[in-house]
């Protein structure tokens, strides 16, 4: 039964080691969450959406 303990803890350590190495190789590029936008980014996106709708049917011609 002693070998089962080594198998369990060894595989658990291997999983953590592989996850750490993947994180270091990809430089933490793949995060499970998306960071919140700042207020400036939110207002810039809203301004871009407003500006995109201006050319539809508006204008003097």
Image (tube, rainbow, N blue to C red):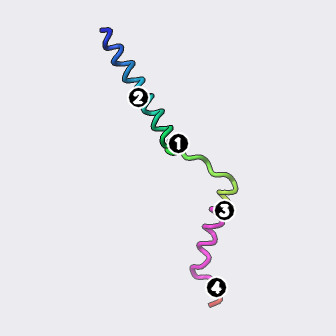
Q: What residue is shown with label 1?
A: 27
Decide which of 39, 17 is in the foreground and name it. 17
Q: Which residue is mark 4?
A: 59
Reading the chain from its start, which is encountered first: label 4 or label 1?
A: 1
Query: Which residue in the protein does label 2 denote?
Result: 15
Task: Measure the C-alpha gap from mark 1 to mark 3.
Answer: 28 Å
Q: Nearer the viewer, mark 4 or mark 2?
A: 2
The segment highlighted magenta reads 44-58
**Residue at figure coordinates x 57%, y 79% from the top left:** 56
Q: How far from the left and from the top, in percent, is residue 18?
A: 42, 32
Q: Position of residue 31 (x, y in %)?
A: 51, 42
Q: Overall secondary structure of the magenta stretch?
A: helix
Mark 4 to mark 1 CA distance (whole Å): 49 Å
Is 44 displayed left or right of 6 in the figure?
right
Give the mark toward the camera: 3 or 2.
Answer: 2
Most foreground residue, 33 or 56: 33
Question: Who is closer to the viewer here, 59 or 41?
Answer: 41
Q: CA distance from mark 3 to mark 2?
A: 42 Å
Please rate how many residues cluster around mark 4, counting C-alpha atoms within 10 Å: few if below 14, some from 14 to 19, many from 20: few
Residue identified by numbered label 3:
44
Residue 10 colored in magenta in the image: no
| Mark 2 surroundings: few (<14), some (14-19) or many (≥20) residues within 10 A | few
Within 10 Å of disc 3 (Cα), the crowding (few <14, some 14-19, many 20+) is: few
Where disc 3 sits, the SS reads helix
Q: Are marks 1 and 3 in contact (CB under 8 Å)?
A: no
Residue 16 location, x and y as percent? 44, 28
- Vertical position of residue 14 compared to residue 24: above or below: above
First of labels 2, 1 by sequence position: 2
Judging from the image, what secondary structure is the residue with disc 4 in?
A: loop
């Amino acid at each position: 039964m002693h070998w089962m303990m080594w198998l369990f803890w060894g595989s658990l350590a291997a999983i953590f080691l592989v996850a750490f190495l993947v994180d270091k190789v990809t430089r933490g590029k793949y995060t499970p969450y998306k960071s919140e936008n700042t207020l400036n980014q939110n207002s810039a996106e809203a301004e871009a959406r407003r500006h995109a709708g201006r050319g539809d049917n508006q204008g003097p011609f």
